[in-house]
C-alpha cells in the first residue's frame, strides 16, 4: 500500500500529464462494485373509488418462498363477486379507471381464472363481498413477482362492479372499474 502511494506521489511530482490521466481512471469505479438495489419483499396498493362509487381498501403483497401472498380488505362493494385484477399501468388518473390499461399480461396468455393453466399474470379471479359490502381475501400466487418481466411494482389493482366469469376474452366481462390503486414498494 505504502509503495503504491509512493509511486503515485512520484508520478504527481514527475509527470503532470501522466498523472492527470491516471487519476481520472482511478475515480471511475468498476461496475461490479456498485451497490445493487435492495430486494423488494413487500408491496401495497391503497385502492380508491372511481367516479360514482365509494369502494376503498388496501391490498398487500408479501414475498413468500411459494410466491407472493396477497391480502385484500375492501369495503363498500355491492354484495357478491367482483373481478379482482392487476392491470398493466399504475395510472388511476382517469375517473373511470381506464388509464390503468388492460390486464397485466407480460406472457401473452389468454384471460383466465387465478388457478387456470393459462391466464394473465394479473388474473386474480374474484373477491366476494358479504352483506355489509366487505370483501376479505388471502392467497399465495406463484405467477406474481417483485422483479423481472412479471414484476407487479408500479402497476395497478383494479376492482370491478361485476364478477369475472374467468373465461370471456380479454378480461372476463367484469364490467366497470369501481376502484383503482397503484402498487408501490412497502416497508418490509
Ligand atoms: Cu380488471
Ligand atoms: Zn385477464
Image (cartoon, helix red, strand yellow):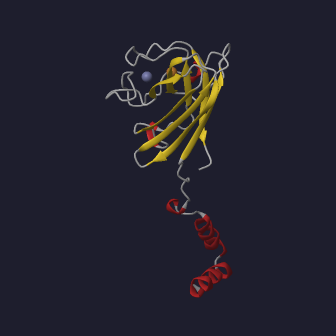
Relative to 78, residue 36 above or below = below
Name the residue at 49% across, 43% down. 146
Relative to 142, residue 158 above or below = above
Q: Quadrant of residue 101?
A: top right
Relative to 16, residue 58 above or below = above
| Residue 127 x %, y % | 50, 25
Q: Quadrant of ligand 2?
A: top left
Picture quarter with the N terminus: bottom right
Q: Quadrant of residue 136?
A: top right
| Residue 131 x %, y % | 57, 19
| Residue 79 x %, y % | 55, 17
Q: Nearer the viewer, residue 55 or 89?
A: 55
Farthest residue to the front: give it. 131
Name the residue at 45% across, 18% down. 164
| Residue 11 x %, y % | 62, 80
Name the residue at 40% across, 36% down. 143
Q: Nearer the viewer, residue 28 or 135?
A: 135
Q: Quadrant of residue 56?
A: top right
Amino acid at each position: 500500500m505504502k509503495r503504491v502511494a509512493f509511486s503515485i506521489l512520484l508520478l504527481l511530482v514527475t509527470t503532470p500529464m501522466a498523472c492527470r490521466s491516471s487519476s481520472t481512471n482511478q475515480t471511475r469505479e468498476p461496475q461490479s462494485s456498485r451497490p445493487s438495489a435492495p430486494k423488494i419483499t413487500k408491496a401495497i396498493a391503497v385502492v380508491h373509488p372511481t367516479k360514482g362509487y365509494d369502494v376503498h381498501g388496501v391490498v398487500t403483497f408479501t414475498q413468500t418462498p411459494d410466491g407472493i401472498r396477497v391480502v385484500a380488505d375492501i369495503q363498500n362493494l355491492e354484495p357478491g363477486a367482483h373481478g379482482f385484477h392487476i392491470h398493466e399501468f399504475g395510472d388511476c388518473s382517469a375517473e373511470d379507471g381506464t388509464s390503468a390499461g388492460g390486464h397485466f399480461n407480460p406472457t401473452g396468455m389468454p384471460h383466465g381464472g387465478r388457478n387456470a393453466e393459462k391466464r394473465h399474470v394479473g388474473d386474480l379471479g374474484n373477491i366476494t363481498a358479504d352483506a355489509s359490502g366487505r370483501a376479505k381475501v388471502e392467497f399465495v400466487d406463484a405467477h406474481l413477482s417483485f422483479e423481472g418481466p412479471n414484476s407487479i411494482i408500479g402497476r395497478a389493482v383494479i376492482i370491478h362492479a361485476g364478477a369475472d366469469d374467468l373465461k370471456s376474452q380479454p378480461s372476463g366481462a367484469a364490467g366497470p372499474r369501481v376502484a383503482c390503486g397503484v402498487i408501490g414498494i412497502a416497508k418490509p
